[in-house]
Structures are given as C-alpha cells and as structure tokens.
Amino acid sequence: MHAVSYSLRSLPLMLVTIASSLSGQTAPVAHVLHVQGNWYQVQQKFPLHPGDALDAGAKITTDSADFGNAITIVRDDDLSRQRVVCEDTQTNPCRKPILIVASPLQAPDVPKRNLSGLVNSALAALYKNNSKAAIQYFFKRSKGPSPVPQAEGVLEVNSHESDALAGILPGFPVGDYQFVIDSFEDSRPLPTQNVAVSAGGKWSGLQVAAPGLYAIAVIGQGGKRMADLMLLFEPKATFAQKYRAFEDAKSSTDLWEGEDARSDEHQFLQGLLDSFTKS
C-alpha cells in the first residue's frame, strides 16, 4: 500500500476547491413558480410545490403520458423563466427529466446582480406567508385572465413626480379618471381620488400619504374599468433602494415569453412588492 501525501502549499487550494464544490451542490439556483400535475425530483420522489427551491444538479420529472402536466421554473441568477408542458407529440418535452444546471461563472469585472434574494422573497410572500396580496391575486386568477391591463410599481409617498406614474401607466388617453384605492394594511376604505392625464401622458392628482401596499382600480368615463394596479408607496429614505430592486427584477420578467408569461410576471412582481413591505 502506498501512502498518499500532499504538500502544505497545495492544501489551501484543495480546501477552496472542495468548499466550492460542496456549495455548488447545496445552494439553490432556481425555484418553482407553478406546478400543474404531479412533478417531483428524481432523487427524492416527493411532490414539488410552488415556491420550492431547486439545487444545481436536480432532475425534475413527471408522468410523460399525463398530457397537460406543466411546470414553471424561475432561475435565481438572472430571473429567466422555463415553462415545460407535456404534449401528445413526438417531441413531448416530458419524456426526459429537466436538469437544473449550475449558475454560470461570472467574470470578476462584471457587476453582479443581486436577484437570488428577490426570487426567494417574492415566492415566499406568494406561497408561504399567507399574505393578503397573494390571496387577492389568486382569487383574481381563479376567475380567469384579467379583462383589463395590470401593472405594478414603486412610488414615493406624497411625490409630485407624475412621470413615475406615466411609466407604470403609459399610453392612456388625455382625460379624467377615478382611482378606487384599497390598502392591504388598513381594512378601512380610502376616498376615491380624481386623477387626470394631460397632453404628453403625464398624470396628476394622485396623493397617498401613508406608506404601504395598495390595490388601485383605474376607472374611466362611464364607470369603465381601465386597469388594475398594485403600487407600493415608500418613504423618501427607502424609496430609491426598493425602486431600483423592483425595476431590476422587472427588466428581467419583461423578457418572459410563451404561455401565461404575462400572468406569471404580474404574479411574481406582486409577490415581490408584498415582500418589500416586510423588509
């Protein structure tokens, strides 16, 4: 038998390599956004649920003959979305397990986007914290697709910056509108506000004095519902930080494509806004 020896000089490098390998095996790199049918990890055999974390190397599978089974996965590193639907075709994507790959290495000179915490926080708000925002969202979703446009955003409390709202609600005709406002923190109804769009698409008249998360129905002429909003109003001290985090996430979810992409995007962003109220 031959003894194996290592130089002390090589030991630190070995320890770093081993630690990196172990962390790559255990750190989640993606989360489940939606599940339809029975999906599970090959290695573990228990059902997957929305909000579950997925480690690099995990293999996700379902009964390929259950056409209509579907799963939606969101990557933690770049917020990309993968949706797989079982089909009665020769190219049925469910015939092979879905492999969750490790996050790619990033060049040290490239600024790192801090998205992994956003994914975990948004899905925890939607699926684990029994939040009012999540309850309202799922109630609306159970009734089918929204008949009006939906939008989300972060605004500063008592801000007079109409450009901010114009970015959330672009393209509205010049005219007067009513905002019917409900607070998620206060069950008491808030007064309806008269808000106007001027030439150039700028909004004026919306004033919210208390920080918090609000659901707003935009009502046009003749009482017609024009849009549904979920807006987070933040104090000046915390507005910039949460605004940047939200816009960073939205720049990625805007790229989602395919079936239910927009519905998934609204759900994710609403969960993210809800999570911001707890941080």
Image (spheres, rainbow, N blue to C red):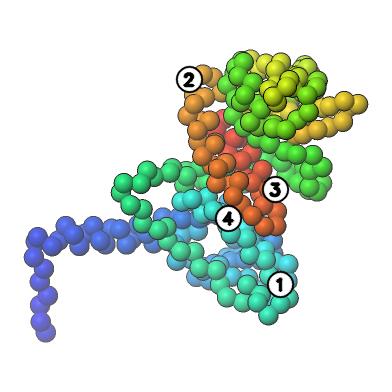
SS of the residue under disc 1: loop
Q: CA distance from mark 3 to mark 2?
A: 32 Å
Residue type highlighted by circle 2: Ala
Can residue 230 be seen in this snapshot?
A: no
Dot 3, crowdedness within 10 Å: few (<14), some or many (≥20)?
Answer: few
* Above-or-below relation of 88 to 238: below
Residue annotated with mark 3: 263
Residue annotated with mark 4: 81
Which residue corresponds to the image point at 58% horizontal and 59% vertical from the top-left?
A: 82
Looking at the rendered image, the quarter that the N terminus falls into is: bottom left
SS of the residue under disc 4: strand
Q: Could you tell which of marks 3 and 4 lies nearer the N-terminus?
A: 4
Q: CA distance from mark 4 to mark 2?
A: 32 Å
SS of the residue under disc 3: helix
Residue type highlighted by circle 4: Arg
Q: CA distance from mark 3 to mark 4?
A: 13 Å
Q: Could you tell which of marks 4 and 2 lies nearer the N-terminus?
A: 4
Residue that extends furthest to the bottom in the rendered view of this protein: 1
Which residue corresponds to the image point at 26% horizontal and 62% vertical from the top-left?
A: 18
Residue annotated with mark 2: 237
Position in image of residue 19 (x %, y %): 28, 58
Which residue corresponds to the image point at 53% horizontal and 71% vertical from the top-left?
A: 42
Q: CA distance from mark 1 to mark 4?
A: 19 Å
Residue annotated with mark 1: 87
